Amino acid sequence: MLDGEVIVIGGGYGGIRLARQLDEVARVTLVDRKEVFFHRIAALRAGVQEEWTTAPFIPYDRLLRNGRVVVGKAVGIDTHEREVRLATGERLPYDVVVIATGADYPEPARFLGTTTEEAAKTFAAHQENVAAADHVLIVGGGPGGVELSAEVRLARPDARVTLAHAGSTLLNSTGSKWAGRRAQSWLESHDVEVRLDAFISPGPDFGTFRDGRGNLIEADLSFWATGTTPNTLWLRLSGHGAWLNDAGHIKVDRMLRVDGRLDVFAVGDVNDVSELKISPVALAQADIAAHNIRAYLGSSGKHRKEPRLYRPIQRTPMIVPFGPSDGLTLIPVPGGETAVLGGRTSTLAKARTLMTPYMRKQLGYAAS
């Protein structure tokens, strides 16, 4: 018997994992403004390679056997009436609500519009812009900026490509200087100009930029890979600003509950857990939240589950592809060190397919 109404707001990595885990034990409704799952990991390649244009889009229609997917935009949570309000005016009653609205990423790792057709047009436009550019500037030397620089270089071997990073080493968020040097070596060996300690700001004219030393850079195409913004403005506008920290992340306790409430959870990029905001972390949080929601819904009787605490993943494996056939893999090892593995491991684990077959299986589709 299905026990309780669970509304999951947001159909990203954490949202679909949690919804699928609860599908057999509760009446699950997944709410997302998009009509398909957006496999963001494949988006950077989709922004430069035509054959990848539709690869990031996977339908939701096979995700849930018992639950349902509602295409719509959540605009508020009424904790007194225990309802989620949609932009259409529809109200969805809940016993538990999970906020999994993720974060807004800079283009091209962004789904614009609500339909596959609308998003595909933006990827096609990026591809055309990359194909026509003489000089492409990528700002930000984290994993996304490094990966995008490699994708642009491989798509346009004849163009000038510059990666500008405000830090003194690439990939500094990983804590591995060796990984940063390895990435810089690959990029420079492929004629990507790497500028470190270069804080970039818009220049005086369109297509011009200044670095921190006042040097002028001219580029006819630029991408900014300088971080993400949590998708929580709707909560602030609907009167739940007290749930948010100064950066806009939702404050959660060790059980991933919001504001001390037993029936409101937040998972993934949207919450304030201090760890790298990457998809494996969102999946790990979804697993703990799903267990705790089952414990809450079945909180009486001799078989009641005990809730679990979420332990932040401070050192997690990470793969940074350099196109489809190279990259680096960071593996934490005992003693606080990080092992950096090379191209073969990275290619097999992620770079070649960008985990698209794996995500298709998660949504009930064949891998191809």
Image (spheres, rainbow, N blue to C red):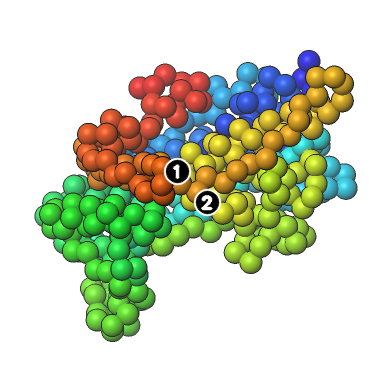
Return the x and y of residue 362 as percentages of the image width and height. Answer: 50, 25
Residue 116 location (% of width, % of height) = 46, 38
- Mark 1 nearby-residue class (10 Å; few <14, some 14–19, many ≥20): some
Q: Which quadrant does the N terminus fall into?
A: top right
Q: How many labels were placed on the picture? A: 2
Q: Does residue 251 appear to the left or right of 118 in the view shown? A: right
Residue labelled with disc 1: 316
Q: Quadrant of residue 170?
A: bottom left
Q: Residue at x 35, y 62 (%)?
A: 140
Q: Residue furthest front?
A: 335
Q: Which residue is mark 2?
A: 275
Q: Is residue 40 visible?
A: yes
Marker disc for residue 326: none
- Is residue 305 rendered to the left or right of residue 153? right
Label 2 secondary element: loop
Q: Residue at left 84%, top 42%?
A: 82
Looking at numbered disc 2 in the image, what kind of residue is underneath it?
Glu
Q: In the rendered structure, which disc, 2 or 1, sits on the residue that comes first in sequence?
A: 2
Q: Residue at x 31, y 44 (%)?
A: 339
The answer to whether 15 is drawn above or below residue 215 in the figure is above
